[in-house]
Image (cartoon, rainbow, N blue to C red):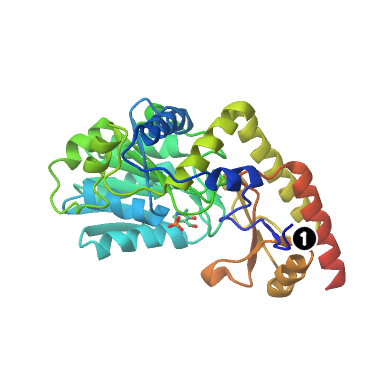
Amino acid sequence: MSTQPRLWIPGPTHVRPEILQACARPTIGHRGSAMKSLVASIDQRLKPLFGTKQHVLVLTASGSAAWEAAIRCGVQERWAAVTHGAFSERWAATGKECGKQTSVLALEWGRGLDPAAVGRFVKAAGPVEAVAFVENETSTGAYSDVGAIARAVREAAPQALIFVDCVSTLAGAPFQFDEWGIDLALASSQKCLALPPGLAVVALSQRFLDRARSVTGRGYYLDLVRAQEDWSKQQTPATPAVNLFYALDEQLQAFERETLAARFARHRTMAEMVHRWSLERGFPSFVAEEHRSPTTACRSAGKLDTATFVKGLKARGHEISDGYGKLKGQTFRIGHLGDHKPEDLAELLRAADETLRAL
Ligand SMILES: Cc1ncc(COP(=O)(O)O)c(C=O)c1O
């Protein structure tokens, strides 16, 4: 039906027709009982995905709005952020734009996060209300150990809230919000959740909410205290993207059928397939082996003309990404996330070989 190439960019990713059909159900009023049931169902199913028994909610906004909400609601004056790629840098910049004092540990692009180094930075930064980092830097494919980093932050600054961006990993790799002691985690709908763009999902600790109540200037639309109070009554402060909520609920039910363990194993299998294929063709991982992402491959391109490669592959029905920002031309990225299957990936890699031969 469609002549669109299959999306293998690291978001938005391929959306199954069944999910698009879920979006096409008749829109309902958001103050009625049907909406309350929908919110209750999402609430119950989203919690295991984050690994929490505390609070989750959905924002009708992309992940960047959840970055801003975290800062506006969790930080009155001063916070710290670790940067090692385009998205973590943008989150730090968002804090500055919101008028908060922002201490930054700026690492080279492509570095994974070393828990001990993050701990030393937090200690040296002095009193901060929160520490933020990105689990999977989508611009470089650097994946870090959230549990170990959270432990290091807690030891260095027990009072600091811990914010984690799991935008390009939630539903593609295990996340243990409660066990790791995270205070806020956020993700976007268009990544491993394999939904159309337009929603952000957020998990909040009770500690975050208690702290946020005394923070002034939280605004209205992105006030997580208000959003959580409404969510606990199966409501939202403003009109939500009802049809995307249908899709989210449908997808969360599909995850239960697949099981999360199988979903995570499928992502790992695809990561290994891309890794092997790339190594055999002379494209090493841009990040060190221990930080290689389960969802987003970023490969050093060497002498490959990445623009021509990406274009040639697109003409063969598969869309991948050039390097991000300053890595354009030096790397290429394959987002093997969401609902793609290993057999789909095998097809992509065959088409990639054909494209390479034709260069
Ligand atoms: C790691 C990461 N964080 C945040 C964002 C921003 O999310 P959104 O585009 O949904 O606002 C992205 C987008 O690609 C991302 O990859």
Q: Is residue 320 above or below residue 188?
A: below
Front-most of residues 133 and 246: 246
> For the residue labelled by badge 1, is the local secondary structure a helix, a strand or a loop?
loop
Side of 46 where 311 appears, left or right: right
Q: Amino acid type of disc 1?
A: Gly
Residue 315, given in percent of the width and then of the height, sits at: 77, 69
Residue 303 at least partly seen: no
Side of 305 where 324 appears, left or right: left
From the image, tell me which residue sits under label 1.
282
Side of 164 where 18 appears, left or right: right
Residue 117, given in percent of the width and then of the height, sits at: 39, 47
Say which residue appears at 34% left-offset and 44% top-offset. Answer: 163
Badge 1 density bin: few <14, some 14–19, many ≥20, Cα 10 Å: some
Front-most of residues 295 and 218: 218
Q: If the image is split into quadrants, where does the N terminus sit?
A: bottom right
Side of 187 where 55 appears, left or right: left
Residue 83, given in percent of the width and then of the height, sits at: 40, 57
Say which residue appears at 41% left-offset and 49% top-offset. Answer: 241
Q: Is residue 196 above or below residue 204?
A: below
Which picture quadrant has residue 255? top right
